Structure formats: C-alpha cells, structure tokens
Image (cartoon, rainbow, N blue to C red):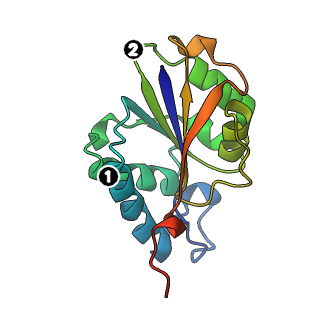
Amino acid sequence: MKKLFLVRHAKSSWEYPELNDYERPLNKRGKKDAPLMGEVFNKLNIIPDQIISSPAVRAITTARAISELINYPVEYINTIEAIYEVGTRELFKLIKSTDDKIKSLMIFGHNPALTLLSNYLSDKYIDNIPTCGMTAIEFDIESWKELKPESGTLKLFEFPKKYKKKK
C-alpha cells in the first residue's frame, strides 16, 4: 500500500510587483492557513515518510510551516526544481521514480498540475485543490513503479475553508 498527499501552496501575495512569480511570499491569509492545515494534518495523524516541495518561496514556506506541526524534520524536506516548472506527466514520472522504501509521499506544489494529477490518479474528480488544500490518495501497490492512471482511491480532500468558523 502506498499513500500520496498532494498539497497546494498556501495563498501567495501579489503585493510586491517587483518580485518574479518564483519569489512571491505568502500573504496574510496564507500565513494563517498553513499552520491551520498543519494542525489538521496532525489531528489526522498524517506524517509522510518523505516530503518533496517546489522550491518556489510560497511552496517551500507552506511545506516548512506544515512540517513543523506534523513533526516532520524541516531539514529533511527535499526541494525539486522541476515541481515548479512541470505538468502532470512529469509529476507522474517523478512519483513513479520514488524509492519503494517510501510508503507515503507528500508533494507541495502548484496548480493546475496538482489538481490535474489528483484527478489523473484517483477514482474521484475534484474541480480544484484550493490554496493550502490537500488530497490524499491510496494505491494498492507495493512499488511506485506500478502506479497507473485512476488506480488510486481518494481518501481525503482537506482545505482551510472546511475548518474556518462561519461568521
């Protein structure tokens, strides 16, 4: 059994027009949502064997904030440049190349690639993984190399608005 967690970065800021897309930081909401979702993941007992992230500022900042709250050592987060730049097919290949010692993998990245990948791999369609949202997909496989389209079962779809108090 393998588990894949796809996490979209928290809400980013457009306040600094001089920064390029790669350097955009989290905005106020993003800085609140990342720890909130870290607490949610902690309560759900989600602790992946490996975390990989896009190195874009908004993605790695989200990964670090959530990692701290699920007791995953921040220094073990692996950044992979390709996550920032690639589409669904390349992410699929990246996951298939994961070491089989890894039973659960968490990827922090960007849309539309994450939503498309979630829909490509799982048995349920979702319109959009919102900022700081996460899908958890389980696969009845022993090796990541066995990964196939629509072979996973969507187990969780979590996002900040599910946990915010209504006013």
Looking at the rendered structure, the secondary structure element under dot 1 is: helix
Tag shown at residue 101? 2
Residue in view at x 50 percent, y 45 percent: 55
- Choose between 8 and 156: the one closer to the eye: 156
Counting from the top left corner in percent of width and height, residue 33 is at 44, 66
Ranked by sequence position, the earlier of labels 1 and 2 is 1
Query: Above or below — where is 58 with respect to 46?
Result: below
Q: Residue at image x 70%, y 41%?
A: 124
Task: Decide if residue 67 is on the left or right side of residue 15.
Answer: left
Q: Secondary structure at mark 2?
A: loop
**Relative vertical location of residue 129 with respect to residue 102 in this rendering, above or below:** below
Which residue is situated farthest in the bottom direction here? 167
Q: How many marks?
A: 2
Which residue lies at the image location 28% right of the left edge and 50% below the top edge? 68
- Residue 126, image x and y in percent? 71, 50
Where residue 46 sits, quadrant-wise, is top left
Verify CB contact (< 8 Å) between mark 1 and mark 2: no
Q: Position of residue 145 (x, y in %)?
A: 59, 12
Amino acid at the residue labelled 1: Lys
**In the image, what residue type sits under mark 2?**
Lys
Near mark 1 (Cα within 10 A), the count class, few <14, some 14-19 or many ≥20, is few
Disc ID at residue 24: none
Residue found 51% across the figure and 61% down from its top: 10
In this view, the residue in front, 102 or 14, is 102
Circle 1 sits on which residue? Answer: 43
Dot 2 crowding, Cα within 10 Å, few <14, some 14–19, many 20+: few
Q: Position of residue 40 (x, y in %)?
A: 38, 56
Looking at the picture, does residue 116 appear above or below residue 24? above
Q: Quadrant of residue 86?
A: top right
Q: CA distance from mark 1 to mark 2?
A: 25 Å
